[in-house]
Image (cartoon, rainbow, N blue to C red):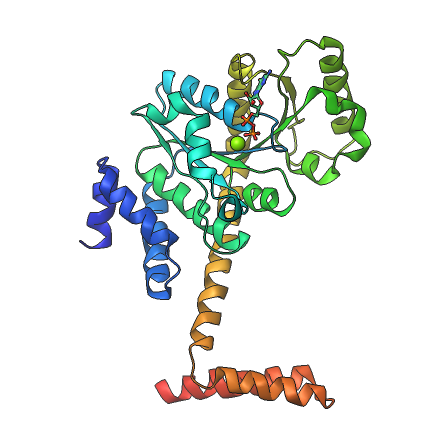
Amino acid sequence: MNEAEWLEAIQAGNRRALARAITLIESTRPDQRHQAVNLVAQARRMATSGIRIGISGVPGVGKSTFIERFGLLLIEKGHKVAVLAVDPSSRISGGSILGDKVRMPDLSAHANAFIRPSPSAGSLGGVARRTHENAALLHAAGYDVVLIETVGVGQSEIEVAKMVDFFLVLMLPNAGDEMQGIKRGILEMADCLVVNKIDQPDAAAVNRALNDYRSALSLMRPRFQGWQVPVLPASGLQGTGLEEVWSTIQKHRDLLQKSGLWQQQRSDQAAYWFGQDWATALLEALQAHPEYGDFQQQAFAAMQNGGSFSDWIEAFLGHFCQTDHRAKS
Ligand SMILES: Nc1nc2c(ncn2[C@@H]2O[C@H](COP(=O)(O)OP(=O)(O)O)[C@@H](O)[C@H]2O)c(=O)[nH]1
Ligand SMILES: [Mg+2]
């Protein structure tokens, strides 16, 4: 089966073809990586509609619960929903697959939903890249909404923000008192903030949190002109506030599409991930060269004796790039 036929099968709803493609994407073998990049590039050309939504927040804030209710609501509206996760700790805990499916029992059982746990192999960069590629594939497979859950700790949020059209951040109501401690970085990335678990009894804390976040955000420069980041109350458990979140996402999309920023953000992101693949593939190709290790050791030894780093980089490029180039032409 060539790539075009493979994608045709995926588009036609063949789950085995989709599963095989995801296995390919999650492979770390260089030849399979290269094929995966081809497949994803074609998938991206085929599926130009669809939306990717990142959902972040500290562990326990209610992301998985929210995603289950939100996903079911979107299916009711006629969408097909896929859920992916970026959790670099899933290799250590090992429980992410089971955990997410157990936490989303109704969604994972639904014919119009597809849930894929975090790839567990490799670095955060590798995990994120594969999630980004899986999202493109899932759009091609007809899952027009892809929800990406990420643990709210540092770098993984930044990676997810680079692969989504809309970045949603869940907060707890009682965190309002700790506004000082909230990382400015996450507010800067958010397209919408949700104060979750408003079903819990302390209504005063909810209102305080809503006000605190609204005033904090009003002091910040908007990421997109004309978009003031909304702060919405919700309860993922009870399903309240979810309609408002969805209409906010649609408003955001309309605004960005009108100004061309939607397409701009997409192509910036595609260029970023291409750069990651490109750099990894080049490095792997160089490292596969039989003299690579010796050369690096020589450079290291020379540097210990006062050698110049840039001289060695120059020497490296001369040896591995120009000689190879000349040999081929
Ligand atoms: N009261 C209340 N509890 C919730 C809500 N959403 C989630 N929870 C509970 O909070 C805990 C963590 O939820 P989970 O969705 O796994 O959080 P995650 O770690 O952010 O994915 C679970 O015990 C949920 O039942 C909510 O809206 N209200
Ligand atoms: Mg979760």
The quarter of the picture where the C terminus appears is: bottom left
Instruction: Give the percent coordinates (x, y) of residue 63.
Output: 55, 28
**Position of 175 compared to 40: left or right?**
right
Question: Residue 215 versus residue 57: which sits nearer the camera?
Answer: 57
**Position of 9 compared to 212: left or right?**
left
Furthest residue in direction left, as rendered:
1
Instruction: Give the percent coordinates (x, y) of residue 252.
Output: 55, 27
Classify 30 as above or below 167: below
Q: Is residue 42 visible?
A: no
Instruction: Give the percent coordinates (x, y) of residue 250.
Output: 50, 23
Q: Residue at x 66, y 36 (%)?
A: 223
Q: Is residue 297 visible?
A: yes
Number of numbered discs overlaid on the protein picture: 0
Question: Residue 180 versus residue 221: which sits nearer the camera?
Answer: 180
Instruction: Give the percent coordinates (x, y) of residue 112.
Output: 32, 25
Quadrant of the displayed image that contains ligand 1? top right
Q: Residue at x 45, y 23 (%)?
A: 68
**Position of 54 compared to 112: left or right?**
right
Rendered image quadrant of residue 179: top right
Classify 70 as above or below 298: above
Q: Residue at x 72, y 10 (%)?
A: 202
**Position of 71 compared to 233: left or right?**
left
